[in-house]
Amino acid sequence: MTQNDNQETVAATRQSLVTTLTGRVVSDKRNKTVTLLVERRVKHPLYDKVVIRSSKYHAHDENNECKVGDIVEIRATRKFSKTKAWVVTRLLEKAAI
């Protein structure tokens, strides 16, 4: 195995470890920051009913291009501030106006 092959393997492994989430923008009031609502469906352990759990994340939006209602993908990155440790990677769907 050459060193170049080894570097490609390490790069592929790192890519698979990167955490990505998809959510809906609920606030874009702050400069270069959007707030996302990420919903997930989980089965309740006792009642066996599927319930929706949600979490809010603050993500860095460098160009202020995301608006309320947009569906975006975010990935984990270094901390930008106390609550902001995610960055917007791509805009999946524009909000219907």
Image (cartoon, grey):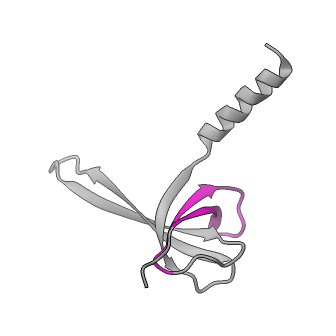
Main secondary structure type of the part rendered in magenta:
strand
Quick check: 60 above or below 32?
Answer: above
Extreme residue in the left direction: 47
Residue 22 on image: x %, y %? 48, 59
- In the image, what residue occupies the spot 34% across and 61% down? 53
Residue 58, quarter of the rendered image: bottom right
Total numbered circles: 0
Quick check: 86 above or below 16?
Answer: below
Q: Which residues are magenta?
A: 68-92
Quick check: 18 above or below 70?
Answer: above
- In the image, what residue occupies the spot 63% across and 55% down? 76
Residue 83 on image: x %, y %? 62, 69
Residue 35 on image: x %, y %? 54, 74
Whether the magenta-drawn stretch holds residue 22 is answered as no
Quadrant position of the N terminus in the picture: top right
Extreme residue in the right direction: 3
Between 82 and 9, the one nearer to me in the picture:
9
Whether the magenta-drawn stretch holds residue 75 is answered as yes
Residue 42 on image: x %, y %? 29, 51
- In the image, what residue occupies the spot 72% across and 34% down? 11
- In the image, what residue occupies the spot 14% across and 51% down? 47
